[in-house]
Image (cartoon, rainbow, N blue to C red):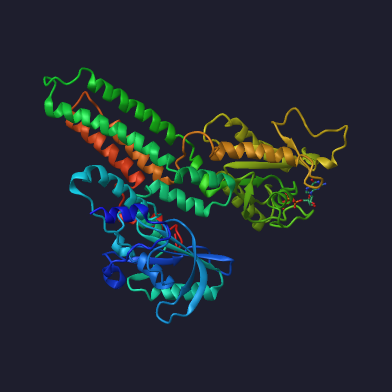
Amino acid sequence: MWRGLSALVTRPASAPLRLCARCSTGAESLVPGSTIFALSSGQGRCAIAVIRTSGPASGLALRSLTALREPPPARSACLRLLRHPCSGEPLDRSLVLWFPGEGSDPGAHGVCVRVSVNLHQSARVLPIVLTMLFAIQGPQSFTGEDCMELHVHGGPAVVSGVLQALGSVPGLRPAKAGEFTRRAFAHGKLSLTEVEGLADLIHAETEAQRRQALRQLDGELSQLCQGWAKTLTKALAHVEAYIDFGEDDNLEEGVLEQVDRDVRALEVALSSHLRDARRGQRLRSGANVVVAGPPNAGKSSLVNLLSQKPVSIVSPEPGTTRDILETPVDLAGFPVLLSDTAGLREGAGAVEQEGVRRARQRLEQADIILGMLDASDLASSSSCSFLDTVVAPLVAQSHDSGRQRLLLLLNKSDLLSANAPASSTALPPHLLLSCHTGAGMDALLQALKTELAAVCGDPSTGPPLLTRARHQYHLQGCLDALGRFQLTTDLALAAEALRQARRQLSHLTGGGGTEEILDLIFQDFCVGK
Ligand SMILES: Nc1nc2c(ncn2[C@@H]2O[C@H](COP(=O)(O)OP(=O)(O)OP(=O)(O)O)[C@@H](O)[C@H]2O)c(=O)[nH]1
């Protein structure tokens, strides 16, 4: 009776586990559900390409390509010769990784362990055996299903040969975009906000975006929402207890008062998150930084310097830039959409005036305005007009929250003589700069970093930010529902308000997500993720 167990206990890691007859016949070992495969690394020639599968036939696929009678140890890399399952032709020598899924059926991936224990000893022994079986099967794969990874050489012929070979294994089909992650979500491995964090991490182009995405993928936003949901559930339970049992049924005193306090505190917390000036969204999509000023101030020169490429034409002729020229830039780790605009002046020709109209329109959309003047030409009518019509109103609203931010720059400092500085006491705070000599550029970059951190938030500190309009929408919905929570009126209505608030939160993390929303979110992924 003990032989089965002792064989398992003493089995050296290298000793083969017995295959069951069902497994060795291949296709019959499939359990319902399709198995998908895809190239998960980038397209094109590279040193190593990663191909993976997910689903119940992953073990069969592994055996078919490697001729292994059993899967390799879970989550350990092994070097194997891959062959086409039909022709037997060698395809590549590659690293093979096996990730058994949750509740993985050993028969489905080729391992069959038969364990017998004495009945009178089962209570003591079974937990040990189950722990060992758990260790063999492992609960850890990205999708929660059986997964397999092949790290093959990255030549296009190798990759297409291996993909073709996987396609010939019964039960396997190519994955659709985002299907691996969708399975992870369906198996409860990731919440919806974590899925969004993963998508953002894949698309992150700057350090700050990466930090924000990683925090979201780590579940910080999800945990915050779960905490709020817990408060609501508790409040709802107490209100419903009052509805069901009434005041006479020995319910603790002051319970409803405590519920009211908890709900009001939650309202304050939600409001403060909603008042984040869309910092998380700005960090995801990039802050709008617009360079504006009178003609010939050096705006195009600055755009070219900041982007380190010739985005705009620079010339001594005033009015050279006629249209909006924009370029994405990584400024101090923050993603920025930098725009050059036509010089603002009155009385020019029709084409230039259209450029001026577009420049003013773009100014309205700016998060940060780099207002630029020629330091050696501050008395000109176009400089004075810019100071009056653009700079003065921005300075006046500088105490508003959600305001546009201004950095006033006086360029061409190299043209000023040492004893005739441009700084006039009448000017608002500004930075002296020279695009020709580079003087003042470090100070400008430092000031820009500070402004960008204010606009996008610091992704390393503070509570997790709402990164999508969808988050704002559901949080606002939750707050609106809490606004309808009144204990002074009908308790049934108060309970309904709490239920609606909870529903909005569950939409945020994915508990109540409709198919259309899920489709939209998973569209952000590539095939193989
Ligand atoms: N001396 C000096 N000249 C500069 C400086 N920056 C730009 N310039 C010159 O000023 C002229 C205008 O520069 P641009 O960058 O085209 O100016 P802009 O503001 O884009 O001009 P518009 O297209 O007319 O709006 C060019 O001849 C530049 O070489 C600087 O720091 N010092």
Q: Quadrant of the C terminus?
A: bottom left
Which corner quadrant of the image does residue 490 belong to?
top left
Q: Quadrant of the N terminus?
A: bottom left
**Residue 198 image point, x, y percent:** 46, 51
For image coordinates 40% across by 77% down, the residue present is 85
Decide which of 27, 233 is in the foreground and name it.
Answer: 27
Relative side of 510 to 219, left or right = left
Relative side of 480 to 290, left or right = left
For image coordinates 80% across by 34% down, the residue present is 422
Relative side of 257 to 409, left or right = left
User: As displayed, is residue 126 above or below residue 14?
Assistant: above
**Residue 45 image point, x, y percent:** 58, 70
Relative side of 528 to 157, left or right = left
Residue at the outermost top position: 253
- In the rendered image, is residue 248 in sight? yes
For image coordinates 26% across by 71% down, the residue present is 28
Decide which of 361, 434 is in the foreground and name it.
Answer: 434
Q: Across the whole image, how many numbered discs are drawn on residues?
A: 0
**Residue 338 image point, x, y percent:** 62, 50
**Residue 394 image point, x, y percent:** 60, 35
